[in-house]
Image (spheres, helix red, strand yellow):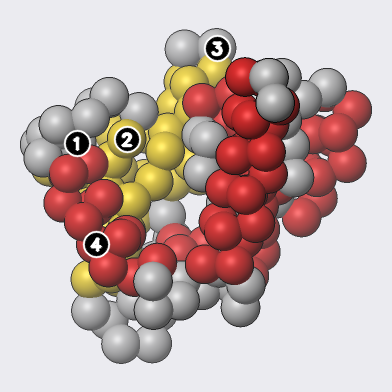
Amino acid sequence: MGILSRVGRFGALFGQYSRWMYRSGRPNRVARPQNHLSGILFAAGLLPHRAARLEVSGRRSGRTISFPVVIADWEGREYLVSMLGERANWVKNVRAADGVAVLRRGRKEPVILQEVDLADRAPIIRRYAAVAPGGRPHLKLDRDAPLEDCEALAPSTPVFQITSRRNG
């Protein structure tokens, strides 16, 4: 078996495992502690700048809910993309909080998350697929996905532009 076929097989297994961890639209018992550890590492700024922990008020409990995210950069701006689509709780919480949230990536950064218009989402989703290996299996996209595939996902994939509350 050649190296490329082994890498391809590993990628397929990773995709199945990743989808299994979120099969109900929420992290399962395996994903929760993994997300907690990733959130700690991301918040500490120990990983690349595109890795962060998002904190937002729960729409029902009012408690701060936090989880790891990957930030996609596109045309000089930063974005969050929901790899689980509309069913992700963080999307519902961000909408209920009118976009008010905090990003932690080495420091606390108060932000506003503004939903991106449907017509503008595809290139951002494409960039997200390029930089977020854990998101690809959920979106069913490759790293170099064609824009047409991303356009097909845009209606069911919320995208939020990140704006610092410090700078307006």
Identified at 52% across, 62% down, the residue is 91
Q: Are marks 3 and 4 in contact (CB under 8 Å)?
A: no
Q: Residue at x 67, y 38 (%)?
A: 9
- In this view, the mark in front (2 or 4): 4
User: On the image, numbered disc 1 is attached to which residue?
Assistant: 105
Q: Secondary structure at mark 1?
A: loop
Residue corresponding to mark 2: 51
Residue 36 is marked as 4
Query: At label 2, which amino acid type do we have?
Result: Ala
The C terminus - image quarter: top left
The three-letter amino acid code for the residue at tag 3 is: Glu
Disc 4 + disc 1, Cβ < 8 Å: no
Residue 36: % across, % down: 24, 62
- Quarter of the image where one finds residue 108: top left
Q: CA distance from mark 1 to mark 3?
A: 21 Å
With respect to residue 21, does 166 lie above or below?
above
Q: Earlier in the sequence, mark 2 or mark 4?
A: 4
Residue placed farthest to the top in the image?
75
- Graded by Cα atoms within 10 Å as few (under 14), some (14 to 19) or many (20 or more), the crowding at tag 4 reads some
Which numbered mark, 3 or 2, is in the foreground of this view? 2
Which residue type does callout 1 highlight?
Arg
State if disc 2 and disc 3 touch (CB < 8 Å). Answer: no
Between the residue at mark 1 and the residue at mark 2, the CA separation in whole angstroms equals 7 Å
Q: Mark 4: which amino acid?
A: His
x and y, in percent, of residue 19 in the image:
62, 60
Residue at image position (80%, 45%) is 153
Where disc 2 sits, the SS reads strand
- Of circles 1 and 3, the one toward us is 1
Indicate whether 28 appears above or below 69: below
Q: CA distance from mark 2 to mark 4?
A: 13 Å
The residue that label 3 is drawn on is 75
Numbered disc 4: secondary structure: helix
